[in-house]
Every structure is written in structure tokens, then in C-alpha cells.
Image (cartoon, grey):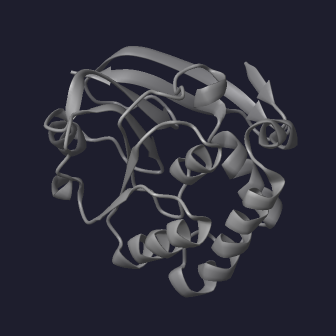
Amino acid sequence: MLKIESQDILDRFLDAARLRLFLDEVTSANRKFNLYSRNLTRNDLQVLVAESFVPVELGWIKSGDGPMLDIGSGWGIPAVPLLLAGLDIHITMVERSRKKADFLLLLLHRLKIHTSIVEGALESVKPKSPFKLISMRGVAVDKKVIHNLKKLIDPAASLVYFGPRPGVSIRSVEDVDYIVDNLPARKIVRAQII
């Protein structure tokens, strides 16, 4: 069981001023864009940002890896924290909701981050080269997603999935239970798509 303290991991990966700006932007925009549950506190948001670095802690995502595809980017977790940390990874963010994709464009402009955002379904993605990393959080991994991913990825691409092991055809599964700040245990999975 991996145990992490959110403040410790944030201190190691993110400049406090950039984290504050990111959280200020997200909090302010939530009223308009409905990015996340209004029941979440700022501390809850910080925990989610800290969790973005669990795959980095595990060595599953490293600077220089990529290109990476973040599916269901929502308010930017895990892609924006990884970019804010200065990891040398080109990340393409995919968001089905036009409102959330518009928010991401505004957010990235304000944070002075340059990356690609695709508004629409996964089928809308037209990569310049095959993706070597895929991240998903809060998105169901089903046969349609796997079918569409196969067209976009390098054969050895790794899927990093925040949540329980998907029930579809994947291989080389490695999963890790982790605890953040003594909250209930969570799971992260690394797999290859067949």
C-alpha cells in the first residue's frame, strides 16, 4: 500500500504560486462550467491535484515519455498538474463537453501552458504520431473506448487508469492501492491495451 501526504507531494512537484493560481481559476470557473461537485472543498481539490502525481511516484509517467493522451480531461486532472510540474511530456487533452473544453482552453492560456485540446469524442482525435501514454480518470473503460484507442496508440502504449481494474481486454496489468492523507484507499492501474 502506497501512502502519500498531499502537501508533501505537492511541495515536491509544484510551485505553490502556480498551484494556487490553478486552484483559484478552477474554483472561480466552477460556478459557470460545473467542473466538479460543489461539495468539494479546496482541500479536496488539492488532494486530487496531488493524486495526479501518483503515477510519477510509481515511475509509470516520466519526463520525456509521450506523447500522452488524457481522456475526459474535465477540469484538467491529471494533465494540468503534470504540465504545471514541468514534466517534458506533450499531452493531448480530450474533453467531450464543449463547456469544459472551452474552460480548459481559457485555463491553459491563463497558466501559460501550451498543449493540445480536442473538444468532442475520442473519435475526434487525429494524432500526428501514435500515443505512448494514456491517462483516464472518471471515464468508463469499455469496448468502444478500447476499439477507438487501438487506432491512436503505439502497440506498447501504457494506460494509466485511476480506479479499479477495467473489465475489458487489457494486459500487463499492474495495480496499486494507495492512501492519500489517511483517506480511504484508492486504486490506480497500469495496463496495455490488446
Q: Quadrant of residue 128?
A: top left
Examine the rendered structure and indicate whether residue 32 appears above or below residue 70: below
Pick the residue in front: 14 or 59: 14
Write down the quadrant of residue 153 in the picture.
top left
Residue shown at 62% from the left, 20% from the top? 58
Residue 40 can be seen in this image: no
Assign the N terminus to one quadrant of the image: top right
Front-lying residue, 77 or 128: 128
Name the residue: 79% across, 65% down: 42
Q: Position of residue 154 (x, y in %)?
A: 23, 26
Task: Give the residue displayed 52% in from the left and 22% down from the top.
Answer: 60
Q: Is residue 51 above or below residue 191?
A: below
Image x and y of residue 29, in percent: 61, 80
Residue 194 shown left or right of residue 138 in the figure: left
Q: Nearer the viewer, residue 174 or 62?
A: 62
The quadrant the C terminus occupies is top left
* Left-right relation of 76 to 135: right
Q: Is residue 58 visible?
A: yes
**Furthest residue toward bottom:** 32
Q: Position of residue 90 (x, y in %)?
A: 41, 42
Above or below, 41 against 169 in this view is below
Q: Position of residue 10 (x, y in %)?
A: 78, 43
Question: Looking at the image, which is closer to me, 23 or 88?
Answer: 88
Count the numbered circles shown: 0
